[in-house]
Amino acid sequence: MDREAATSEERRPAAGSMLRLGRRGLLLGLAAAAAAVMAARLMGWWSPRAGLRLFIPEELARYRGGPGDPGLYLALLGRVYDVSSGRRHYEPGAHYSGFAGRDASRAFVTGDYSAAGLVDDVSDLSFSEMLTLQNWLSFYEKNYEFVGRVIGRFYGEDGLPTPELTRVEAMITKGLEARQEELKEKQKFPPCNAEWSSAKGSRLWCSPNSGGVSRDWIGVPRKLYRPGAKEPHCVCVRTTGPPSDQTMDNPIHRNRGDLDHPNLGEYTGCPPLAITCSFPL
């Protein structure tokens, strides 16, 4: 489901070493806190609640907002929401009408609005795609009324989560953890600025805000080799102070920042401490 294609109503869901460590610690602490809050929220969303209405798919299919229909509902990961207040987006003939009266969780990620795509099977989605679903779930929780659950893939006849929903929850949790690790690495190794032209070739350079990471150092371009990645990518590496992963109980360092990290490599033909690397054609 393309959020950017929706109207604004439907748009929803980057001094010294001690100062650097403090700022990085604050950012990572906020990320960890956000992940913990989201994990707790997920548990609250999916835990049993007394008095909830349970729908069978055939019953939910009646809620498509057409003449004589009892309402306008959609489901996401088995949770049913009344989207009547967003009728112009979901009613018959509207852009997202295919989501009404069913659980089309898969299409929120794939954008496949065909009959084959408007289904609830998310068994082969990646961690990042599961996080997209989680973002959509947050959106519907915030903007629409939760009215019940669909019996089927995600909830049993007793209204309790199925093993499939438990698996989805675990993947979302792992995805949140992976996102936190990505933020940690991005603060440590911000992406380089890059440009290319047919006349001048390519140029890589670092700045205090390169990669969208505001910081009090500039850094120098280096190749970062990630385990499992086919190609390295350019990151900016701090050149002074202690390594980012140095513990406070070991204050001795070579004042080279992260230059000696084992996953980094220099660019051939670029001076080791240059903040710009140019590669003419």
Image (cartoon, grey):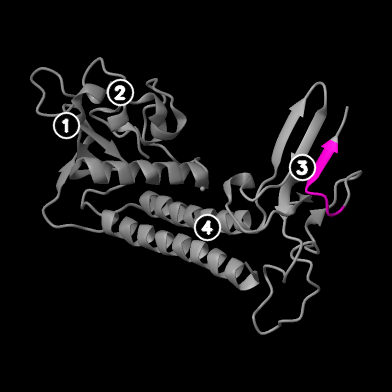
Does residue 151 show up? Answer: no
User: Dots 3 and 2: beta carbons under 8 Å?
Assistant: no
| Residue at horizontal 78 percent and vertical 71 percent from the top | 255
> Which quarter of the picture shows residue 42?
bottom left
> Which quarter of the picture shows residue 230?
top right
Mark 3 / mark 2, whichever is N-terminal: 2
Q: Which residue is denoted by mark 2 in the rendering?
A: 98
Name the amino acid type tagged 3.
Answer: Glu
In the structure shown, which secondary structural element does the residue marked by tag 2 occupy? helix
Query: Which mark, residue 231?
Result: 3
Q: Which residue is denoted by mark 4 in the rendering?
A: 180
In the structure shown, which secondary structural element does the residue marked by tag 4 occupy? helix
| Residue at horizontal 71 percent and vertical 83 percent from the top | 250
Above or below, 44 against 210 in this view is: below
> Which quarter of the picture shows residue 263?
bottom right
| Magenta stretch encompasses residue 275 | yes
Label 4: how many residues lie within 10 Å, few (<14), some (14-19) or many (20+)? many
Above or below, 200 against 278 in this view is: above
| Residue at horizontal 35 percent and vertical 41 percent from the top | 136
Mark 4 / mark 2, whichever is N-terminal: 2
Q: Which residue is denoted by mark 1 in the rendering?
A: 85
User: Dots 4 and 3: beta carbons under 8 Å?
Assistant: no
Label 1: how many residues lie within 10 Å, few (<14), some (14-19) or many (20+)? few
